[in-house]
Amino acid sequence: MLSLRNFWRRHKRKILITSGVLGSGYFLCKLYNAHQQKLADLERELARQRANDELIKAQLQDHFENVQLIADTTTLPHAMQYLRTRIAEELDLSQLTERLQKGKDQPTTLTSSEKLELWDRLKILSFTQMLVSLWAVTMLSLYIKVQVNILGRHLYIDTARGLGSSLLLENVDLVDRDDQQNFLASADFLANNGLLALIPNIQAVVTEVLEGKKLTDLFNTTSLHETVMQILNKFMSMGSPHQWIDYLMPEDCGHYKLGPSSSIDDMILPDSMNFDQLMVEARAVLSSAEFGKIMEISLKVAVDALVDDMEAQSQSTGASLTLGMPLAKLLSRVLQIIPSLLGEASQNQIIQIIRNLPEVELFFTLLYANNLLD
């Protein structure tokens, strides 16, 4: 016992220091292990969240592509078919062409002044029909893509919210099924209502631009392109900067009543965001500077495609629009090209060209993404 006390007395300081060091080491070790466990748990949680977000991004891309497919293969073909019928009803040139053909077969049935008057009417109305068809097809294809992307955004949010993605924002309104159907059906506003103002306004510009042009005047690809662009530019500059939107959608949604339509019904969405809000959102997109640029690009390439098609059509008959042809002969080419402008969406060259423009693809990608994050 004495030796133990002596040992303690001699080594007391060392023992206390050693015990303190060992105790501190044990405590630090436990603390370090706990910290490492927390880091491991946090890393697992972050990995789970990253995997979830990657899943959401992949689903977002798939859904975006499906939305574009719906617009191109279902919604647009329905609307195009109805638009084609309405333009044919509002701009029926058959009686005019029949009278001219009868005057050609039976020269005594028409006087020279009557023939000249009929040819002048044919000049104005054929260009009017061509420009109305070109503008309507271009703008309708863009507008329906705007609609479907807006609706697709709301549907995606409802689907993805159930996965708890960190990418999603809360308090985003959803869309009632009836309002969704009415919103899509409003694409027929152009055919039901817009044409009634669109046709006379384009016809007024066509009359102004073609005034003084004789049936014997030569037109080639360059002059035809310039003439069509001149008509479009004058038409688009009429009235207020965004007056053209009123041809595509009603200015006052509250008083708009859906008329006969192409029965568009493509997507089923849950409730709460109403028709008026959807229309306001669509008008905001159409009024944006970004859409204005896309519209200008699309109309320009549509005119390019139109002139190229008319040249190809001329060459197939042994003529050449590049070398020039009298306006009277050009009018027959105009009448022949109109059906292709209003052709089935899946085979419509103008629609296909516009859809595949990089600028258009980027615009709708950004529209879909920006709407998601707004």
Image (cartoon, helix red, strand yellow):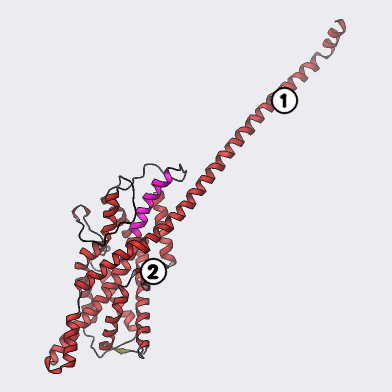
Residue 265, percent across and down?
A: 30, 56
- 252 left or right, relative to 70: left
Q: Which mark is residue 107?
A: none
Asked whether, in this view, residue 296 is left or right of residue 102, the answer is: right
Q: Which element is circle 2 on?
A: helix
In the displayed structure, 132 sits above or below 166; it is below
Residue 187 position within the rendered picture, expressed as x and y whole percent measured from the top left: 28, 61
Horizontally, residue 81 falls left or right of residue 17, namely left
State the image quarter where residue 243 is shown: bottom left
- Asked if 66 appears above or below 122 in the picture, the reply is above
Report the front residue among 63 and 218. 63
- Residue displayed at 46% across by 55% down: 61
Measuring 32% from the left and 48% from the top, which residue is drawn there? 175
The residue wearing badge 1 is 25
Tell me which amino acid carries mark 1: Gly
**Tag on residue 354?**
2
Q: Which residues are magenta?
A: 146-162
Quarter of the figure that contains the N terminus: top right
